Amino acid sequence: MSWKRNYFASGSGAGGSGGVSGSGMQGILTPRTMTSIAPSKGLSNEPGQNSCFLNSALQVLWHLDIFRRSFRQLTTHKCMEDSCIFCALKSIFAQFQYSSEKVLPSDAFRSALAKTFQDEQRFQLGIMDDAAECFENILMRIHFHIADETKEDICTARHCIPHQKFAMTLFEQCVCSSCGASSDPLPFIQMVHYISTTSLCNQAVKMLESREKATPGMFGELLRNASMGDLRNCPSQCGQQLRMARVLLNSPEIIAIGLVWDSDHSDLAEDVIHTLGTCLRLGDLFYRVTEEKARRSELYLVGMVCYYGKHYSTFFFQTKIRRWMYFDDAHVKEVSLPPPLSNRNLCSLLNIHSSIYVSCLIVNKHSYKMTFFN
């Protein structure tokens, strides 16, 4: 069932039939000009390397101003020599900043990543892997290198960028509104907020059945409802069926949302695109938010990692030129979108193929808010 076709008027998207580099991109992607303030660079991915998932994660980290500026200030770390993610990231960032080459190799980082995760048999040379999980694991390795002995779930080091900027400090709990019983709170920290795309689309149907039309503020509520999980019995066995509620205890500056697909051939690809919003309030995303600053926070879409044809690519907002860019390994193009950024022109951007899967969304705080264009 396509909830999008039922609830959106025809023409709200601009679906194409070509592949990522085909005719569906005409009028949307334009060649990168050499006069931009800070020309973005591509990353190489030779046949057999299968490094597109890593290249997408690296482009996200580099173009996140908050991360890039904070990481630049770090100078000391626990070095692991040829398997040191910190050193590898410093190296590729220096090349992004100073190299005159338009395309940079990511081989050294790929090698360090493979050696780091050799025991787990993840991110090994020549083998495709998941971009969102790669992004998450890079963050945790940065924590390891700079916080050293501090545990992942209780890190309070002020210089730890992953925990200070990305980490969501949460607890889950069931509370019965009938008898008042509650389950023991389960505290945890997550770098990426994973959500099932099937649940996302099912919740979209339910929410739109109870209102006249989709609204911009619906996105956070939709994500919250989709991440509540299955019904559970009341802790006191009173007969009520409850869903788990998540409470946010801090105020992260960057939220990464990983979209989990049931298969590589899901028929929900187009529907998921139409659920996406461009603004996210933390108070909508979670059942409760304890910090006043977090309750007032509005975060804006700045990046998307997409998957199509066993290949990852990335859209990201480049703040210096105030334009969206498209990164497909070595290929970098500027995105032409009419202002302001909305669900409608977001759909125009992503509907380049009926089977393009959005793998990860990046939202963060920034002062220019929705004024993306001059």
Image (tube, grey):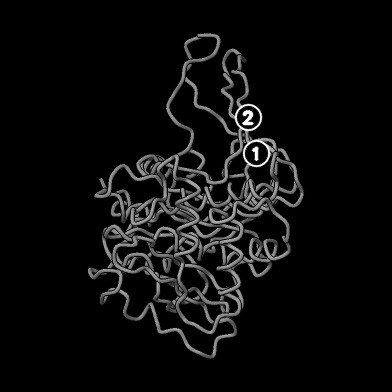
Q: Quadrant of residue 236?
A: top right
- Determine if residue 336 is in view: no
Disc on res. 63: none
Where is residue 321? Give x, y as percent: 58, 80
Where is residue 315? Give x, y as percent: 45, 67
Compared to residue 205, the image places residue 37 above or below, namely below
Say few, some or many: other residues with alpha carbon within 10 Å of mark 1 (under 14 / 14 to 19 / 20 or more).
many
Name the residue type under label 1.
Thr
Say left or right for 50 vs 58.
left
Where is residue 54? Give x, y as percent: 44, 59
Q: Residue furthest front?
A: 81
- Foreground: 127 or 39? 127
Q: Quadrant of the N terminus?
A: top left
Residue position for label 2: 187
Say left or right for 151 vs 269.
right
The residue positioned 60% from the left and 51% from the top of the image is 80
Residue position for label 1: 169
Q: Residue furthest bottom?
A: 35
Name the residue type under label 2.
Pro
CA separation, marks 2 and 1? 8 Å
- Foreground: 70 or 142? 142
- Determine if residue 54 is in view: yes
Say few, some or many: other residues with alpha carbon within 10 Å of mark 2 (under 14 / 14 to 19 / 20 or more).
some
Where is residue 364? Give x, y as percent: 61, 58
Q: Quadrant of residue 150?
A: top right
CB atoms of marks 2 and 1 within 8 Å = yes
- Foreground: 120 or 177? 120
The residue positioned 39% from the left and 56% from the top of the image is 358
Compared to residue 157, the image places residue 91 above or below, namely below
